[in-house]
Image (cartoon, helix red, strand yellow):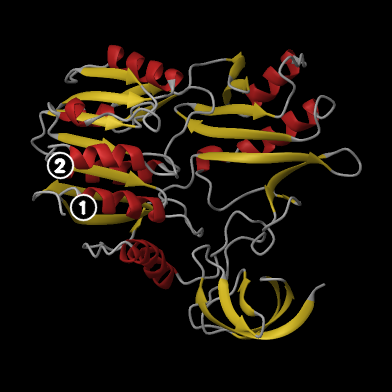
Amino acid sequence: MATRISLDIATLSPRGHGLGKAASGLIEVPFTLPGEAIDAEVEGARARLLTLRRSAPERVSPPCVHFGNCGGCSLQHFDLSAYGEWKRSLILSALSKRGLSPPVLPLVDAHGRGRRRIVLHARPDPSGEPRVGFMAERSHDLIDIHDCPVLAPELALAIPAARELAKLLTSFNPALDLQFTAVLGGLDCDIRGLPRKTTFPLDEAARICARHGVLRLSLHGETAIASGSPSIDCGGTHVPVPPGAFLQATAAGEEALAAFILRHAHGAKRSADLFCGIGTFTLRLARQAWVQAVDSDRVALSALAMAVRNARGLKPVTTLRRNLFAEPLTKPDFDTFDLVIFDPPRQGAQAQAKELARSRVRRVIAISCFPATFARDAAILVEGGYTLEEVLPIDQFKWSAHVELAAMFVKSSKPRR
């Protein structure tokens, strides 16, 4: 049962929600800031902001009319300077818990032109008309939107395209997820939620795609309609984009990460790019060094191989399909490399970090989207004799609690006992 209480907000949780202490313990209140006094409706350890009785100096007017309802952005009310320091503190805190205190540079704003990929949810309203948007905070309620300030201009047509496609496909499945990616010359769209053997009006779907610049429409990764071959530019090399492929959230974020890698990779002769995906970093690094690219995704590796075949001016690139969680590269595998990059998913790369720690690779560059698992893996490398020389926080998830980072390790001593 919900109760109403008054609360003073003392700090922010790692999710970017205000935390205040009540008689029952710590209470988490979205859309609040340290130093604020509020009235909240509390149920368990969660609460909903009712009244803001005292505002923090860092509170600003959010730029989006959906803020407070849509769950996509949780921090639009936070002054950007204080917000940047808070995001940097997430990394400092995670490292400190592992006994690490390396230099952590100021946060780089890599929002750039905005997000280049987006997943829109489509659900019918009571009249059967599709609503398109994002889920509300901690809810399955859909917030219908018509524009979004975090999107790159190239994705402006994604929302109307999703609305028309959802209306066309409602009779096949009322609950759809549509992933749009901004690619060279248009958009790519992958629809999830339809039955695998769905036969839908291809002609009308093709007309919708043509109106909104959708080059390819796929269903669960299988191409249904294509008027072009979606691709992106990776440091001067065009790479075909598989349906639903992973990309860095913003083009500016990708450039910032790549610049960090190339700065610290100077002089490398033979390198390995682990969890390489479609080759975002492989292709840039191959301008100066031989690269072995490793990933478990067969389709992504095929796209990378095609890009290499069509490129000019690259050093040799080889690809290896391997599940690095179940079968990490081992110490002997690293004997010929003077540089290793690893960019794992959110769960990190604990097994691979243990093998790297045993290796003689001089330089290791880590990319991570989750400070807690990065700090765990970093502690493993440091225990194996590496020095964590520099950490760069990169913000390509503006107004959210997510932060990207790049880190440089150098083998500097014998393993610690």
Q: Quadrant of the C terminus?
A: bottom left
Left/right of residue 184 with respect to residue 319 in the rendered view? right
Is any atom of residue 235 visible in this view? no
Placement of 63 over or under 29, stated as above or below: above
Residue at the image position 66 percent from the left and 64 percent from the top: 68
Placement of 121 over or under 186, stated as above or below: below
Q: CA distance from mark 1 to mark 2?
A: 12 Å
The secondary element bearing badge 1 is classed as helix
Q: Quadrant for residue 349, please give it.
A: top left
Give the farthest residue toward the right.
Answer: 127
| Callout in the foreground (1, 2) | 1
Instruction: Decide which of tag 1 and tag 2 comes sooner along the chain.
Output: 2
Q: Amino acid at mark 2?
A: Arg
Name the spot of residue 321 as percent of width and height, x first: 36, 19
Specify the label residue 237 is tagged with: none
Residue ID for mark 1: 382
Residue ID for mark 2: 363
Q: Quadrant of the N terminus?
A: bottom right
* Frontmost residue, 239 versus 301: 301
Residue at the image position 57 percent from the left and 33 percent from the top: 180
Name the spot of residue 102 as percent of width and height, x first: 22, 62
Name the spot of residue 322 as percent of width and height, x first: 36, 23
Left/right of residue 6 with respect to residue 366 in the rendered view? right
